[in-house]
Image (tube, rainbow, N blue to C red):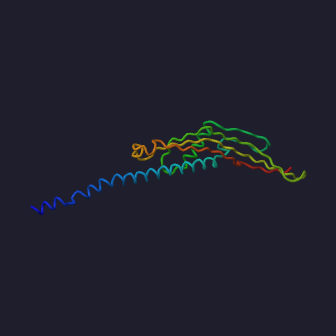
Amino acid sequence: MRKLAKKIRFGENGQAMVEYAITIPVFLLIVFFIIDFGWISYQKIAFEHGCLRASWYISAEDLGDDDLLEEKYSEKIYAGDELDELLEEYIESSFWGSGVGELSIVDAQAYLYNDEKTSGGKVGEESNYTRYMKLKATVTYEITPLTPLFSMLNIIPDQIKFVKNIECIRVVATSQRTK
């Protein structure tokens, strides 16, 4: 009887279960944090890359601009749904294998204009016509974290919003003429 009483008093039968019950919530918090942090980081990087790609790969032909660089001062402004859809298409194509969150484009505008630079003397004077595109847009991207745990604990908001202002000027065509 004494041996049985000693065994019951100093037994370690439930110790492993208590340790498991204490450590599993901490372990799950760490795992869910790693999953959400990786997901959010990937989405931000893909969004930034998509905006950069859209701002540099959109061409004058995509917009229907057919300026032949024959006029010194030629200007045209493109805006509206067609430009928004074009930018959205380029941005979405940069996401590899995962669904895109809520993407919205506001105030997209492409301003195309010509500029002339002359060099040389009166005889054999060269004129260089260059067509530039100034692209401006505000892009908003909202994603939802993968795990609901942090939104239940109010650690991470239900929707995470990234905002990017695209503003760049680039050359879309050049022409050189000798008079």
Q: Tell me which residue sits at (72%, 39%) in the image.
A: 76
Q: Quadrant of the N terminus?
A: bottom left
Q: Residue furthest top?
A: 80
Q: Residue furthest bottom?
A: 3
Measuring from the top left, give residue 9's x and y in whole percent. 17, 59
In the figure, is residue 61 to the left or right of 47? right
Measuring from the top left, give residue 123's x and y in whole percent. 90, 52
Residue 23, by quadrant, is bottom left
Measuring from the top left, give residue 32's x and y in whole percent. 40, 51
Q: Tell me which residue sits at (67%, 41%) in the image.
A: 110
In the figure, is residue 71 to the left or right of 144? right
In the figure, is residue 86 to the left or right of 156? right
Q: Tell me which residue sits at (29%, 56%) in the image.
A: 19
Q: Residue furthest left?
A: 1
Measuring from the top left, give residue 118's x and y in whole percent. 83, 50
In the figure, is residue 99 to the left or right of 134? left
| Number of numbered markers | 0
